[in-house]
Amino acid sequence: MGTQYAMRNAEYGARASLLSTPRFAFLLLTFPLLFTAIAFAQLSLVEERELTLVRFIPAGVLAIYLLGGTWALSRWRPGHDRLLLPLTGMLSGLGLAEVARLAPPVFLTRQMVWLMLGATALLTVALVPRDLRWLRRYRYTWLFAGLALLAATLVLGVNPSGFGARLWLGVGGVYFQPSELLKLLLLVFLASYLEDRREVLIEVEAQIGRWQVPHPAYLGPMLLMWGFSIVLLIWQRDLGAALLFFGVFLAMLYAATGQRRYVLTGLVLLLVASLVGYRLFDHVALRVEAWWNPWAEASGRSFQIVQSLLAFASGGVLGQGLGQGLPTAIPVVHTDFVFAAIGEEYGLMGTLAVVACFALLVSRAFHVALKARRPFDQLLATGIGALFGLQSLVIMAGTLKLMPLTGVTLPFVSYGGSSLLTSMVMVGLLLHISGHRPSRSKTT
Amino acid sequence: MSRFTQILYDYLGYDVSLEWILLALRLLAVVVLYAFLAVIIYVIWRDLRSAAMIKPQSSETPPLTDESVTPLGRLRVVSSGDTPLQPGDAFDLRTHVTLGRAPDNHIVLPDTYTSAYHARLDRRDGEWWLTDLDSRNGTRLNEVPITKPVPLADGDVIGVGQVELRLETGDRDQRRKTQWNLSNSA
């Protein structure tokens, strides 16, 4: 009975809105598709001085995914959030264009394959399960699967390029980055765990001296798990992932309990961990120094960040135009530094638009969380929103020298199959939650 | 001159250099990007505005009976849980009342163990009926969890989360009717 009220409220909000009409969803898709087509026309004209049909294959792939996806979702999940697919579609289109621009052709083919895999996964997650109870129920399975993956990477990990952090698992020439999957698994675990323990985390307290703290019996396992995964990540030198995990963990803890002291404690812990990391680990100290004063070794260890800053500077307001700048001067520009390439070739206008796309994506994720009825769904959507927000901020700020650089991908835009696939599964989860009509049966 | 510009020349009748085409495409890309963002922001803004203009109360069903003007009883707070309410506070009851944590309930109970839309009181045939709205921790009537809608009598205590509320109808009519029913059945 109660669900009727929530449903009625939701429908009242949507009835006057364009957001509920399928025709509007298709109309909105013309923008990302047109943008992608323009980008590939630019590339074709710059590199071949011709318009060749082959060049437009990625735009076609994107069109199949977006149009087919919107059709399927409108048909079987009529309540879904119709802004999610166009927003991520715009970013994916930009991503395809940047991969084509910055990386060898074989990378583009691989990225298209991953995009189609991701689209399949997204639609499967959004359409097939009746609800997400199964995700919630097997939370310890997800946790241990994640930790096992991490351990496997520690032992068997490789780096496809032959040097640097060994964060990949390879099977027959296909490489996968487990920390991306780990993000998803831990999000699900945290949402499930926090939903279950929310009340005791708020209520049950212990006294340490003058301080009221949550009872260690309830917080302990979670802190232990987090300490463990963060130690492993530092061991693996995947600083970016460690930072993201911790930030998302704090955001979800705050969303679940509404207790500011958890966030404050967490930030203090993060500060302490950073200082310890700076003292103990060379690669952390290196990153901080390259951030604090890159010009000391502009052609040495800070080469990347200096080139990135030069790229932004030469972009100006309108940019050089796709294909007409020199972003490939930045090492590994197609993954970590794709934002700098956008800055050079699309200029300030392009970078601001990317920031706006991410801001809107995060706001839609939180909107989905607010409208969701089940606490698990709410927490999961909050976590996904926080992850997208933090991840894009960390890498954009890193390339702009606003904070020390940590290597994470810019979701949907950077080259990288694991990242694209995971991000699309997360969008699939958001679509599932937003398109879900609560059943009349008992939910708990 | 590339084949592409040659075709354009043949088609248009005058020479367009590749540089101008690229500049046009560049500007077009920016226009498409910002048109996209503008449409999305406009739609979200419209959505929020229309949601703000519809008052939650106005979306409720019309009164079940037309006794909506004078209060038909009170719910008096017996114990307030961790809500800011004080024992002794009272809510006037009209014909249809929802209780829960969400701000668009008639009676908002920001209690830890209360669901967003927890329970409902309806006026049916001169009596108050209590319905649990699939709440997580259930609704109690005089300490006993209810499983289906139940009619209430004056002085019944409703338990919602940690909050307890006593129904005060002060309704002589109802008592008289009950007595009449009793005497009738006797």
Image (tube, coloured by chain):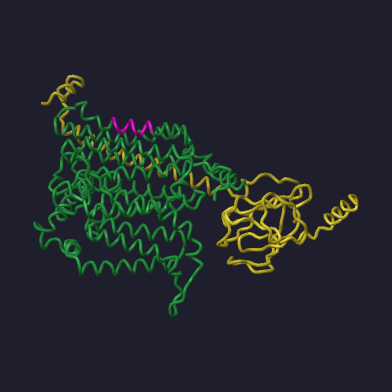
Chain colours: A green, B yellow
Left or right: A297 in relation to B78 = left
Left or right: A300 in relation to A108 = left
* Residue drawn at x 38%, y 42% as measured from the top left: B38
Q: Does any portion of residue B55 appear in the rendered image?
A: yes
* Residue drawn at x 37%, y 47% as measured from the top left: A361
- Residue A61 painted magenta: yes
The vertical placement of A221 against A184, above or below, is below
Where residue B23 appears, x then y in whole percent? Answer: 20, 36
* Residue drawn at x 40%, y 37% as measured from the top left: A124
The vertical placement of A272 against B43, above or below, is below
Residue at far top of view: B10
Magenta stretch: dominant secondary structure: helix
Question: Start and end of the magenta stretch?
Answer: A60-68
Left or right: A225 in relation to A99 = right
Task: Say which of B75 and A22 sits in front.
Answer: B75
Left or right: A408 in relation to B153 = left
- Residue A381 painted magenta: no
Picture quadrant where residue A27 is located:
top left
Q: Does any portion of residue B46 appear in the rendered image?
A: no
